[in-house]
Amino acid sequence: MKTSINIIQPDDWHVHFREGEMLKVVTKYSARVNRRCIAMPNTTTPITSSIQAINYKKLIESNSNSINFEALIPCYLTNSLNIDDFTYALQKKIFVGGKLYPSNATTNSQHGVTDIKKIYNIFEIMEKENSVLLIHGELNRDDIDIFDREKYFIDEELYQIRNTFKNLKIVLEHVSSDYGVDFVNSNQNIAGTITPHHMLLTKDDVFKNEDINPHHYCMPVVKNEKDLIALRKAACFDNNKFFLGTDSAPHHTNDKVQNQSLKPGIFSSPCSIELYATIFEEENALGNLEQFSSINGPLFYGLEINKETLTLDKRSKEINEFTEEGNIRIKNFSIDKKINWKVL
Ligand SMILES: [Zn+2]
């Protein structure tokens, strides 16, 4: 039995750092184990210009407590981008790609795109620049059940994008269903990120009768056991198409009370790589962790694989119930089972 594993230092291809006090508190938890993180651009004022991206990157890196840490910023795609600035920022690698939020799919996505055809000109530029389109793949419409949003998005929009822009690299973010896994596996130039919570929770952990557990409420919502099993198989065994993206998404506990405005998101960065290691061990796939956490992502994005390494020891990791600093109070993601691995 292994008591220690040494892997190439991971990257997290999907994290929310927010802004203000929250950013100052949460950033160091991701920089603790990751060399690079893609910082989601759905801040209160979305990141849509090169100058905003440069400033946001600086702000995150200066709060990371690490000299090696790098924040990568995608552009929040809207109907009204300045195309010249966008193209310039892609060419200069100021933007690592573009993020598509369907309108009102999750936190601060009210600026998102209502009709994807209106931004086909943007996809064209991205395809030409060999850039990456990151997608929150859910269709949010009144007649669609919350558990079916990913499937509908794939059927009604993603197939269309895929077939129109065949060379555009696409990441289906936080894949949450077996349907999503199948789509990624059966199409070219597409990869998926998988969160720890989608491999640990099912809808019974979120919805009980009329009640919602606000701390397990996220978008896309966690689904059925068959979906969890498909995601575990994809992360642990499926070739090179899936990689690490925690979607760690902190909210103040005041925004996590059960009411109309309950905000979706799970804060997992204090124990992210430890959760993944625990899952891979359960699947007898510890040997594949590095591929998922540290190799598949940079290969897909066309970036260098990290030179640094990270060691995890087999010992149980205790997680505090909350991350608390100053006025910030965030519930840490926790599960019933033990976390068996720890970064010292
Ligand atoms: Zn997210």
Image: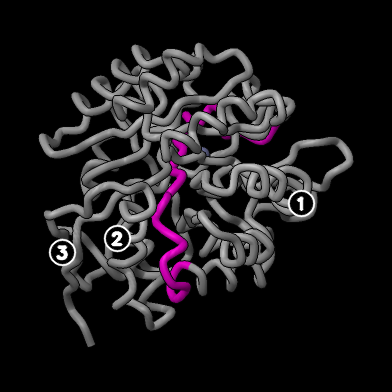
Which residue: 42% across, 40% down? 130
Question: Which residues are the magenta region?
Answer: 235-259
Which residue: 41% across, 78% down? 282
Badge nearest the viewer, 2 or 3: 2
Task: Find residue 1 and name its label.
Answer: none
Which residue: 60% across, 13% down? 80
Q: Where does residue 14 sit, x and y in percent of width and height?
A: 42, 43
Which residue: 49% across, 56% down? 191
Quadrant in which residue 123 is drawn = top right
Instruction: Pick whichever, 14 or 183, lies toward us.
Output: 183
Q: State the residue position of label 3.
A: 311
> What quarter of the picture does the C terminus occupy?
bottom left
Whether label 2 touches label 3, CB < 8 Å: no
Q: State the residue position of label 1.
A: 155
> What quarter of the picture does the N terminus occupy?
bottom left
Q: Where does residue 100 sit, x and y in percent of width and height?
A: 58, 33
Membership of 257 in magenta stretch: yes
Circle 2 residues within 10 Å: few <14, some 14–19, many ≥20: many
Instruction: Pick whichever, 98 or 181, lies toward us.
Output: 98
